[in-house]
Image (tube, rainbow, N blue to C red):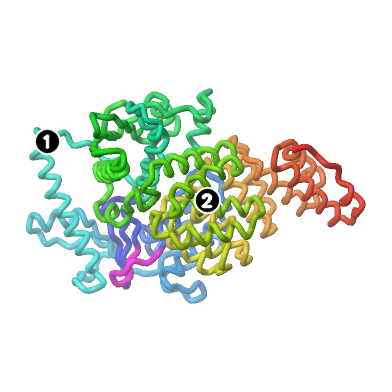
Amino acid sequence: MQTQPGIVYQFGPFEVNVASRELLKNGRRIKLQEQPCRLLVALLENSGEVISRDELRTRLWPHDMFVDFDGSLRVAVRKLREALDDNAEDPRYIETIPKRGYRFLVPEVRRVDVAYQAAQVTTGSGEDPEPLEKDPTPVAVSPGRVPLLKYAIAAVAVLLLTAGVVFLRQKRVQAKPLTDKDVLVLADFANTTGEPVFDGTLRQGLAVQLEQSPFLSIIPDEKIQQTLGLMGQPVDTKLIPAIAREVCQRTASAAVLDGSIARIGTQYLLMLKAVNCESGKTLVSTEAKASDENHVLDALGNVSVEIRNELGESLSTIQKFDTPLEQATTPSLEALKAYSSGTQALRTKGPDAAAPFFKHAVELDPNFAVAYAYLGVMASTTLEPSLSVDYRTKAFELRDRASEAEKYWITATYHKGVTGNIPKAIEACDLWIQDYPRSEMPHLYLGAAVLPVVGQNERAVEESVEGIRLRPDYAIAYGFAIRAYTALNHYDEAKATYAQALERKLHTPFIDRVMYELAFAENDTAGTAQHAAKLEALPRFGHQMLSMEGDTAAYSGHLNDARTQPPRDG
């Protein structure tokens, strides 16, 4: 049975809204990630019946996606039981049927079609919601049922709004909004002012604004670079509308966001539109004026809020996640341009090339929190621990000058790299996941940097696999999963993850590094030699491999070889 929007399941003190994937207990939201929630819906749709493991595999994971199915299913069941406060040994809700699957035990599950119920409210009908049992008990409006009433009222409002749209259709064509599954490509702003300070800067500022949204999803720049390579274009190709639209089509995205800035006398006009990448038709558009250069970032914030609303995001999330751009980044156009250049250099050339731009950004604006955070992370990779602590501490002190997602990142990196308070770092990432369920970054940071510190390797695997599911084209995510599997001695799963990355033609030197570690763990000398050879010729990695091969020789008892490893270029 396919899930349907507008359906709410009720059992005991719990309610599950299928469309929003919310779990409520006595009206209060219970944290539950997507896979455990999908598992719960599958069980509720088959309440009282055994649902097989094969069916759950089909329901929970795409057929072309590799996961450690047994382990991932156990994790989803465990997280679901934790949310329901259930006990595997003495279950009230979820029963394990050995070698077969699982069964939902509660017979009094009610299935409510909220949209249908709301329609009955508008027509005066008092029919009961559709039950799963033949003789259900009527539902009273109690504190635990208030959310259902809320859904019904909201559905009535939707029906009335729909009627209004039909009435006004002759005056205005209603653009089709996006869904929370759609993805956007962010094009470069067309700059006709002749002022280079806007080049790259406005796109970066808009990206910061839109990434605050838990509803919208923007194609990552790394994916854009991969796609440009497949198109035979340089990775730094300017994303003019035609190029951006082809990227949009190749990545199966929904629309392109095209922006422009023009100067009219002393004023600036910013325009932003969403264009369907298949048809080329404009879905929505908006514009804003700035009285002078100092107010351009204000205008950019205004068009970003308007476009989020026009594309279908709810006002409640816009209000919650709308840190003004000048507060989320910087009020200085020059500092924002330096920051934009830094992120571009970091993607294409690495930390050494990016660091001067981030340093210039904080020179121009000493309160630029996220620029300090980047400097802190990069200092740790260049083995400057005291400098890393200083930068991370500064970012944490200024964290109120960042977007909500960046606050979580800054907090997590601070506690992981400065205070050593790993539970606090985990808490920040968990809150990050709760507010931004479509983001892979908190999962990957947990799996790669935080959980291994305290030996939570099983959860590190879970989070790394979830990161791959959310962003299957991100090469380094596979490296994190390989390392986590290796730490658990799950070598077959690590190799399968590597095979999956190869099948997708994804590569990063980090993958070869962790595969070297896997080969070492298995005492596979041919494997260590193979991956070492790939890394030796690379700048920054040749010296690392020299050190690792020396450690390998020493571990094997070849101390003389460890002392006399020949120097290599790079």
Closer to the camera in the image, 46 or 389: 389
Would you place residue 66 above or below residue 230 in this image? below
Determine if residue 359 is in view: yes
Residue at the (67%, 54%) spot, across then down: 383
Q: Which residues are magenta?
A: 23-31
Q: Quadrant of residue 17?
A: bottom left
Q: Which mark is residue 78?
A: none
Q: Residue at x 53, y 47 (%)?
A: 359
Task: Identify residue type, mark 1.
Answer: Arg
Residue situated in front as seen by the camera: 366 or 244: 366
Q: Nearer the viewer, residue 37 or 342?
A: 342
Q: Position of residue 149 (x, y in %)?
A: 19, 64
Checking the image for residue 374, the label placed there is 2
Q: Which residue is mark 1?
A: 169
User: Upstream in the sequence, badge 2 or badge 1?
Assistant: 1
Q: Is residue 210 magenta?
A: no
